[in-house]
Image: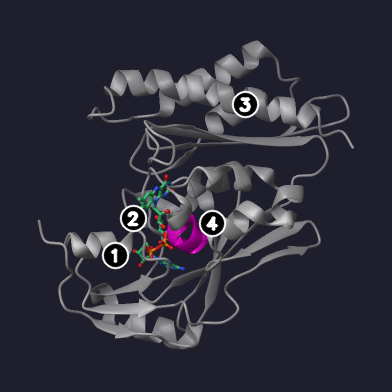
Amino acid sequence: MLLHPREFEYFAPKTLHEASLLLKKHKSDSKVLAGGYSLIPLMKLRLASPKYVVDINRINGLDYVKKAGNTLRIGALTRYHEIEYSDAIKRSCPILAETVRGIGDAQVRSRGTVGGNLSHGDPANDLPVAMLALDAEFTIRGPSKQRTIKASKFYTDVFTTALRVGEILTEVKFRIPGTKSGGSFQKFERRAGDFAIVSAAAQLTLDNQDKCKYVGIGLGAVSSTPIKVQEAEKLLIGKVITKDAIERAAEKCKEVSSPTSDLSGSAEYKRDMVKVFAQRALHTALERANSNKK
Ligand SMILES: Cc1cc2nc3c(=O)[nH]c(=O)nc-3n(C[C@H](O)[C@H](O)[C@H](O)COP(=O)(O)OP(=O)(O)OC[C@H]3O[C@@H](n4cnc5c(N)ncnc54)[C@H](O)[C@@H]3O)c2cc1C
């Protein structure tokens, strides 16, 4: 097995503009390097062999967690460990701290970036699933313009996203869940820190009559892309969330999933696990929303 990458040219631009011009110039022969915890292993195994690597780590101002009104903004170069220990995240969006806590090991969490995890397009990555539950939006910078895209429209196929030539994901933002909100990320894995066999995230907000005012449900590792299960969300919105309603929503999650059989389990078994983990995520999110009645 080869364990060193093919020769490549390395760039370390200091501005986003410079980085996106380099990416535009070298098109599909180039790759952004962020934490390197997915790209470098792929290069070593020669599953990816970019001729040009554009390291964005020297670009200032992409590493932050900021509250702006009722929106939380996270810069693409924010490392998982910063999310894990951020007071702003713990206060306003604990589901993200819970999600990153289960990613890899301490080494991966100290280098891996939010932008890299979201851009890689691995259906088994954890952060996209939580971002779908939060109905997040991604800010993308190209050489001449900036655009935003919903997380639910970003993932187009396995390891494929809506990013175009020259574009860099710079920020993720979402509405901060208010009072009577709760979220939960649940991951079915063989050993702690492994990639998910099945993952499910749920984020809920209840109104004054305890009816569901907001719900977001995301699933990972059970389709060619992470998926937002709007069909299940529709079953809960506007209603008091009962055990039966959760079971129906989780059944819908199972219906829309299309996992493949592999060494971790058969497709049939994984679909059963989708229901179990979606139920756990919804029950825990509801419990947390009920105890968050400031
Ligand atoms: C041992 C191990 C265990 C792991 N376990 C988990 C796990 O349990 N859960 C999980 O979710 N992940 C896991 N990972 C993957 C890890 O989280 C990676 O860090 C992540 O997938 C990619 O983030 P990165 O910053 O390292 O990106 P990189 O590896 O630098 O880049 C990944 C891809 O995204 C592109 N990219 C990076 N940043 C941007 C950007 N801002 N804009 C546009 N494109 C960009 C790159 O060009 C590349 O194609 C694990 C990795 C290892 C090595």
Note whether residue 252 is visible: no
Q: Distance from label 4 to label 2 (Cα)?
A: 22 Å
Mark 4 and ligand 1: say if the CB distance to the nearest ligand atom is below 8 Å.
yes
Q: Nearer the viewer, residue 258 or 184?
A: 184
Residue at image position (33%, 41%) is 224
Residue at 53% in and 66% down: 76
| Image quarter for ligand 1 | bottom left
**Position of 12 relative to 85 (above/below):** below
Q: Is residue 56 above or below residue 277?
A: below
Say whether mark 1 is within 8 Å of ligand 1. yes
- Which residues fall within the magenta stretch? 109-118
Judged from the image, the secondary structure of the residue bearing numbered disc 2 is strand
Main SS, magenta region, reads: helix
| Badge 1 vs badge 3, beta-carbon distance below 8 Å | no
Q: Earlier in the sequence, mark 1 or mark 3?
A: 1
Q: Amino acid at mark 1?
A: Ile
Asked if marks 4 and 1 touch (Cβ < 8 Å), the reply is no
Sequence-first disc among 4 and 2: 4
Residues 192 and 232: in front is 192
Q: Secondary structure at mark 1?
A: helix
Secondary-structure class at tag 3 = helix
Question: On the image, numbered disc 3 is attached to which residue?
Answer: 282
Q: Earlier in the sequence, mark 4 or mark 3?
A: 4
Q: Amino acid at mark 3?
A: Leu
Q: Name the residue tied to disc 1.
A: 40
Q: What crowding class fits label 2: few (fewer than 14 Cα within 10 Å), some (14-19), or many (20 or more)?
A: some
Q: How far is the residue under mark 1 from the one under mark 3? A: 36 Å
Q: For residue 23, what is the image quadrant?
A: bottom left
Residue 134 rendering spot, x and y as whole percentages: 63, 45
Residue 80 marker = 4
